[in-house]
Image: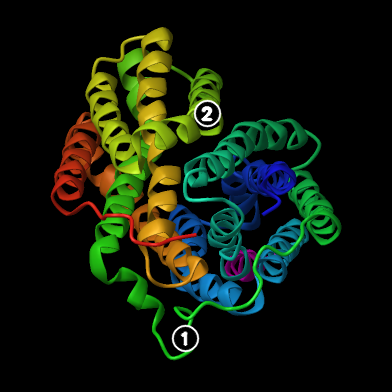
Amino acid sequence: MQTKSALPILFVVMFLVMVGFGIIIPVLPFYAEEIGANPTELGLLMSVYSLMQLIFAPIWGRVSDRIGRKPVMMIGIAGLALSFFIQAISTQLWMLFVARIIGGILSSANMPTAMAYVADITTEENRGKGMGIVGAATGLGFVFGPAIGGIFSKISLSMPFYIASASSFITLFLVMILLKESKHGKSNSENKKTSFWSAFSGTSSVLFIVQLFISLSLSGLEATFAYFAAKKAGLGSVQLGYIFMIMGFGSAIVQGGLVGKWTKKYGENVVIQGGMIVSAIGFGLILLVHNFTTAAIYLTIFGLGNGVIRPSVSSLLTKTSTTGHGSSTGLLSSFDSLGRIIGPPLGGWLFSISIGFPYISGAIITIVAFVLFLLFRPKVISTN
């Protein structure tokens, strides 16, 4: 296991993947509007990507169990590069939809394959650390990506898409040259005739439900917090950008530096439970936001709790699931995508009833996930 050399490379790869993805976030709504999209079509444009990821992430995870992680990761990154390029040259709305569908189908290979790669190259003791490093790379990519996108959008609205495409092509070459295949041979659990839903069976199933609930509550917050902060504290888009940047840095530091130590010392079960408690407290504190400082502090507290959950869930899943690492992490990504599809419209509907409802419901959903996990938490059964 060449963990020491592979993890830094994987960190750089996932960071660049997420920078490329994040670059287009602040620009896509305006770009689509310029081409002629109305608000409903823009919503569909955003959701079709997540829908494709929901469907195809488990498939790619399973393919990576059969043919290896590196070729599947290369397919995912090449898909992003192609998707961004098509978006850059789009002159009609249907071209944007084609690009988003291609991007959703192919890029859904990236996250489950990266997590499976970590599971391949780490011991069970160090699994949490590896998953945390991937989570930190993802978080930092989302911090820097939108900022870069905002800067280059001043040149033209299509420029961020060209930059994102170029970044993805560079990442593809890095993977091709530097990243070694982590998977050698096939385990008995990776039988061709088993359904990828078999990963949902047994004691591990609660982890998928937990990930769905956490993703749902998080995406509900992300969809409504800008409106909430504007009404409660009069904060504008620039201030919100700084707030999310502070939260992202805090979350990345915890994921990259502390998740590994905590999971090694206390185990994933304890870290997941602690993360959910802090997340629920964070949701409650958000209701008390009244200025920039309180918004930054309370959202960061939420982010710290939320940030430790995903890598710890991923780590525990690869230890407890009896299917291949790719199959189980692919299905986990699918549940994550499902939460991201349901969360924004649910959060928006709750916000329309009362501006505090998305955060009250977020706290309740997190507490329900905590209770479910407490009752049905899995025990480590696999061996490395």
Assess whether residue 166 is covered by the magenta stretch: no
Quadrant in the picture for the N terminus: bottom right
- State whether residue 201 is above or below residue 271: below
Q: Residue at x 61, y 34 (%)?
A: 140
Q: Is residue 17 visible?
A: yes
Q: Is residue 258 left or right of residue 284?
A: right
Q: Is residue 372 left or right of residue 271?
A: left
- State whether residue 293 is above or below residue 326: above
Seen from this angle, which residue lies furthest bottom? 193
Residue 28 rendering spot, x and y as whole percentages: 61, 48
Residue 342 rendering spot, x and y as whole percentages: 32, 56
CA neighbours of label 2 inside 10 A, class few (<14), some (14 to 19), many (20+): many
Residue 371 rendering spot, x and y as whole percentages: 14, 44
Magenta stretch, residue numbers: 92-103
- Check contact, mark 1 vs mark 2: CB within 8 A: no
Q: Residue at x 20, y 43 (%)?
A: 365
Q: Residue at x 29, y 61 (%)?
A: 204
Closer to us: mark 1 or mark 2?
1
> In this view of the protein, which residue sits in the foreground, 86 or 140?
140
**Residue ID for mark 1:** 191
Q: Quadrant of residue 311?
A: top left
Please tell me which of labels 1 and 2 falls first in the chain: 1
CA neighbours of label 1 inside 10 A, class few (<14), some (14 to 19), many (20+): few
Which dot marks residue 75?
A: none
**Residue ID for mark 2:** 248
